[in-house]
Image (tube, coloured by chain):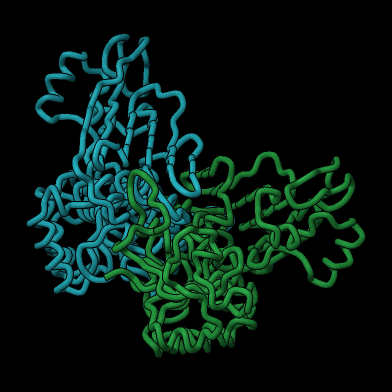
Chain colours: A green, B cyan
Amino acid sequence: MPLRIMQLGLGPIGLLTAEAVLGKAPGGQMELVGAVDVDPSKVGKDIAELLGADRPSGVVVRGDANRAVEELRPDVVLHTTSSFLERVAEQLETCLRSGAHVVSSTEELAFPFERHADLARHLDAVAEANGVVLVGTGVNPGYAMDALALAATGVCTHVRSIHVERVVDASRRRLPLLAKVGAGLSKARFEERAAEGGFGHIGLLESMRLVAHALGWTLDRTEESLEPVVAPDDVETKHMVIAEGDVAGIHHVVRGFVGDEAVLTLDLQMYVGADTPRDSIRVDGEPPIHLQVEGGIFGDTATAGALVNTAGVVHLAHPGLRTVAELPLPRAFGTTPGDHPVIQ
Amino acid sequence: MPLRIMQLGLGPIGLLTAEAVLGKAPGGQMELVGAVDVDPSKVGKDIAELLGADRPSGVVVRGDANRAVEELRPDVVLHTTSSFLERVAEQLETCLRSGAHVVSSTEELAFPFERHADLARHLDAVAEANGVVLVGTGVNPGYAMDALALAATGVCTHVRSIHVERVVDASRRRLPLLAKVGAGLSKARFEERAAEGGFGHIGLLESMRLVAHALGWTLDRTEESLEPVVAPDDVETKHMVIAEGDVAGIHHVVRGFVGDEAVLTLDLQMYVGADTPRDSIRVDGEPPIHLQVEGGIFGDTATAGALVNTAGVVHLAHPGLRTVAELPLPRAFGTTPGDHPVIQ
């Protein structure tokens, strides 16, 4: 029996995720049974139309998530509506109570046990009581700077420290990401808004806490820094022009200390014009490991991939609020070797 | 409570594994409670003596595995006695019946469901009946060419094919490995012994089957090739001299086909003098992923690391004969951030 998937949230990532589910082989391991968004311009349309596909999929976008989960009874809800846990807690709870596992791109959910300890306890109890799993994942947090960093230590007898670096060329990414990294702002405006907490990659601290927790490490303290990356010349992208001296993106670093030593460093650079995008994980350990993904992991597709693939294994974890460190080894789910299937 | 570990088998890998357990912080997450080997020259000695350590560990090598597990009741047995499942099945069964999880370096155990289907079924039943987990792992099989290859697909929405390449400089490795790859033999002698099945990396086919199974792929057929790598010049190693034209090691390749397409390729080169050791995983998928470990993963330490780290998470899997794909995401277990602990 294929896994019955409902997509909740049809922003850019939600649409990619729905597309990935629809792209699975017909009669295969998963099928899309529902799609939900609050946007009135999307409700009532066949999701294939939103994806620019020729043939209707038969899945019509609904506006009411509560009714949708009650009527459709999906096995797994793929949830992509917000980065912030407090905003989505009620949505998550509704899905869990319907008996669906929930795999969410909410960045703060990747490791919510410090920033939102009470809410995490509550959601854990709801999930457990309903015999289902709730987990936050995506490419980052959820993979590039945490799960993959942990996996890199999988054969180490000692680990002294881990240094993770992710460099993303923001110009290749979707428009909301450009706004998130402040691309195109003057330096003064960036700093004004940064002081109000308006920037920074949501979930970087969560990734670090997830790594520390899974390694059984207790950090004495954490440090966080956020600086603008300034365009050295005028840069033109598909979406905007950034003038020389204006902000091209962010350089966001978190560090975890034991005593005076930074034992965990997560260094994220997301800016327009980054010319050597990469993912690099250095484990100072025995054996030492330097793992790299050449050209970096392309984030938009990868987040959809992380969600869809996690849907395939989520039932194997113990019910409750879990992290990716408690799920089986990640792997692609429901793929067809050889040629890519086309959307039906 | 620290995990109580018994080391069964004190060859080069077993000693490294015992050393890794003894190297964990005292009062920490695991402790060595027993060590067993059949070699009369080892029995009765403190294992610290075998490791060349100054201070006794208090763990004296025993010769009788059955009595050892009955008396010591370890939580986990780390098993490193042979590559071949039929030779070790009885040992494994004894340990499982004592109520211990077993993490074994037996290469054929990494995915035994085809080569040894009946035996696999039997061991699965024994493990399940005793509420414990049996799993085969190590650096290869168990990590470099299978678990890490799967993890590389963890964010892919499509996977068309996977190409894994591992190049190992055999001169850096332990002596038994040199013998295993035929280093120093004439080409004629190599081919004679290869025809009798005397060479080749045990477990390469197992790695490929593990990857296919975890992806839900059915292979139409598999191909295997084994060629000697010939020394282009005289090569001198710590252990031997290899004359120009003699065998420096092996080039062992397995391929898995769907139709006419090789959708899985595992290409392993282990030879003396390999000047660019590396681990490389190319996923032809969406997004494409090219993951590399610079300089390769140093195998001896890494196998010990894989065993010790798996011991830390094995209880989280469902009882029975499992594969690494069914265990949680790999990660180092019981490590101390900052400086390395010294053996007590």
Is residue A189 visible to the viewer in this orientation of the structure? yes
Quarter occupied by the C terminus of chain A:
bottom left
Res. B53 visible in picture = no
Q: x, y percentage for residue A113? A: 57, 78
Q: Position of residue A330 (x, y in %)?
A: 41, 59
Question: Residue A178 occupies which quadrant of the picture?
Answer: bottom right
- Name the foreground residue: A276 vs B10: A276
In which quadrant is the N terminus of chain A drawn? Answer: bottom left
Q: Compared to B290, does B125 lie above or below? A: below
> Image point 37% across, 43% down: which residue?
B161
Find residue A202 and report its horizontal and vertical position in percent: 67, 67
Q: How many numbered markers are drawn?
A: 0
Residue depicted at x 43% and y 66%: A57
Q: Nearer the viewer, residue B13 or A241?
A: A241
Residue B14, relative to residue A75: is it above or below? above
Decide which of B212, A57 is in the foreground and name it: A57
Residue A146 pos. (x, y %): 54, 60
| Quarter where residue A197 is shown | bottom right
Q: Residue at x 66, y 62 (%)?
A: A257
Q: Quadrant of residue B160?
A: top left
Residue at image x 37%, y 21%? B237
